[in-house]
Amino acid sequence: MKDKQIVSISYDHEADVMYLNYQDVQAVAEEIGDGIFARYDPKNESLVGFTILNFSKKFTQIPKNIEIPLQQSA
């Protein structure tokens, strides 16, 4: 059986921001959609999490597909 990956999810109600983290590291962010940021480890460019601004407004709309690059653009 593969090792499980833990995802930490937190929501800042006052700022209406959702955070999803796969690793707790310093990261660089790239906007991949309107107010949706993928965060990458700058050492190896692996995806370490997401930040979603205006979360409650985005999820009262019809869901959309979002393409997520697995490695940061050079």
Image (spheres, rainbow, N blue to C red):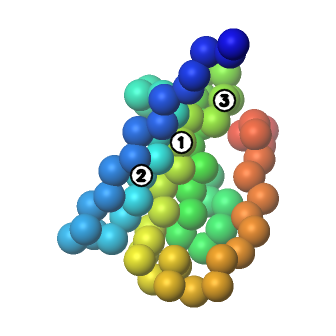
**Does residue 66 sit above or below 74 in this rendering?**
below
Label at residue 49: 1
Image position, residue 14 (x, y; %):
21, 70
Mark 2: give few (<14), some (14-19) or many (20+) Cα within 10 Å: some
Mark 3: give few (<14), some (14-19) or many (20+) Cα within 10 Å: some
**Does residue 57 sit above or below 36 in this rendering?**
below
Q: Mark 3 = which residue? A: 46
Q: Residue at x 56, y 26 (%)?
A: 5
Image position, residue 11 (x, y; %):
32, 58
Residue nearest the viewer, comparing 39 with 7 = 7
Q: Quadrant of the C terminus?
A: top right
Q: Amino acid at mark 3?
A: Ser
Residue nearest the viewer, comparing 58 with 44 = 58
Q: Toward which corner of the image does residue 32 lie, by quadrant?
A: bottom right
Direction left: furthest residue: 14
Image position, residue 24 (x, y; %):
41, 28
Residue nearest the viewer, comparing 28 with 3 = 3
